[in-house]
Image (cartoon, rainbow, N blue to C red):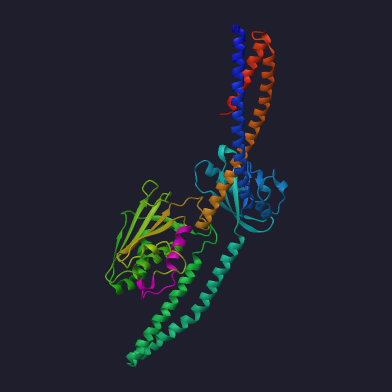
Amino acid sequence: MVDDKQLEAQQAYAQAQAYGRDLARLYALEKERRKKLEVTSQKLQAIFDTVPTGLAVVDHDLILTEVNPRFLALFEQKPDCVGQSLANLLPTETLLKSMSLLSKGLDKQNSVEIQTTKPVNRTLLINFSPLDNKQGWILVFHDLTERQRLEGLKSEFINIAAHELRTPLAGVMGFVSVLKEDLKDAGNPIATEIMDLILQSTDRLKGIIDELVDFAATQPLTTDSLHVTDIDLGRLLQKCITILQPQITTKGLSYQFDLPDEAIVVQGDQRILTEVIYQLLENAVKFNKPQGKILVRVQGVSAATSTHETHEKKGIIIEIEDTGIGIPQTELDKIFDKFYQVEEHLIRGVGGLGLGLNIAQRGVERHGGQLWVTSQLGRGSTFRVMLPILTESFSTSIDNRLDVIHQQMLVYAQDMARAVTAERKLSKKMEQINSLSASLAKELNRLAALQPGATAYNQTFEQTQKIVQTLMSLSD
């Protein structure tokens, strides 16, 4: 007959066996989780090793903790540079300041442009993002040196070509004007009309040359090349309208300003913003219908009142609305491309290189703003410019599409860092499980050899329970 002590021992042993089965199940789950994590870690490591940009993980003192092959090639370093300070490779004052502002929530800018002399003179764009749990930072390095050199050569070529074209063109226009007056005085209307046509053609050629020069001037060569001053936006708008007044009068257009009562002062580069507004107003004039209308509206905007999904900064919005030919919906995403023009049958009789809107967009982007359009074919278009309030830490991105790639690299690098951290934690947990499993097996064997109720039995049973509880806590 089984007494109470034996029954208790049997129950304890059965419970221990149940714990053992739970342990086996837990071990299998952890093993599967570890396998999946290892696969993810391998994928992220492959991305980390093969991306064509330099990646580095640093702690809060900018000590390198992990780098990829592209980083090593960029700075001509060996793998043993891990553990050294990033300050040994490049100036870090601006980077540290920007990191501090971002971490404190005082600025959303997550990139800096740095000039370095190691191993050679070059310009680097560095994107940075904090790791989870304040473990450090992910840095993405882009070498802009060759890009800037090519941009400089392109602008230099355009400027030289424009100068070489302008000089003889000025002479032609001058002589044609003199001939026109002489022929007019001589009473030769046919020859005078021919001279008018020549002047119109040369004036158009001059406009194309000016457009090329403006296009070169708005290229974002560096982020610190803006000459920022206070600008009276009302005066700027009126100045551009005055320049376009002959064309407005010729087409019989009317225009209206809808501006706040107080003066509107914005911060920016006077020359570039003038070019932006001029291009948009000229567009509204060129593509408007005879006797059409132009409405210019200015209003304040903030993150809370913005209707455009990408707006995040407080600033102003300038709207230029026309009653022109409009733009097909299929063309809206192309009109800001270089040298692009809307379908020929829609703009017959309207000349141009297709650079005006690209020039305007470039100028707006250099101020950290945005330019977009809404349009209805046959009814007109509305172009909107959002200009943010500039701060001391203001700098513009080199290229919006490049910035998307930067952010993707940061995400990949962050995922890789998280996977490495999780893998280390899981590895440590597995070591604990293995150790506790061995201890549990040892205690279960001792328990089976002892008599229920004995002091040694009770002590062993308590120890077994503690081990099982610890194992169960590791499954959380």
Q: Is residue 209 magenta?
A: no
Residue at 34% from the left image edge and 90% from the top image edge? 190
Q: Is residue 104 above or below residue 401?
A: above
> Looking at the rendering, in which quadrant would you find the N terminus?
top right
**Left or right of residue 15, residue 174 in this image:** left
| Nearer to the camera, 35 or 401 | 35
Q: What is the quadrant of residue 134 in the picture?
A: top right
Q: Does the image show residue 181?
A: yes
**Left or right of residue 236, residue 440 in this image:** right
Q: Does the image show residue 469?
A: no
Q: Is residue 248 above or below residue 33?
A: below
Q: Is residue 356 magenta?
A: yes
Residue at 56% from the left image edge and 48% from the top image edge? 410
| Nearer to the camera, 70 or 34 | 34
Q: Give the x, y percent position of residue 334.
A: 43, 64
Q: Give the x, y percent position of residue 45.
A: 63, 46
Magenta-colored span: 343-366
Q: Give the x, y percent position of residue 49.
A: 64, 50
Q: Give the x, y percent position of residue 23.
A: 61, 26
> Looking at the rendering, in which quadrant would you find the C terminus?
top right
Q: Is residue 28 above or below residue 71?
A: above
Q: What count of labels does the image hold? A: 0
**Left or right of residue 237, residue 166 in this image:** right
| Nearer to the camera, 244 or 113 | 113
Residue at 30% from the left image edge and 70% from the top image edge? 289
Give the farthest residue toward the front: 1
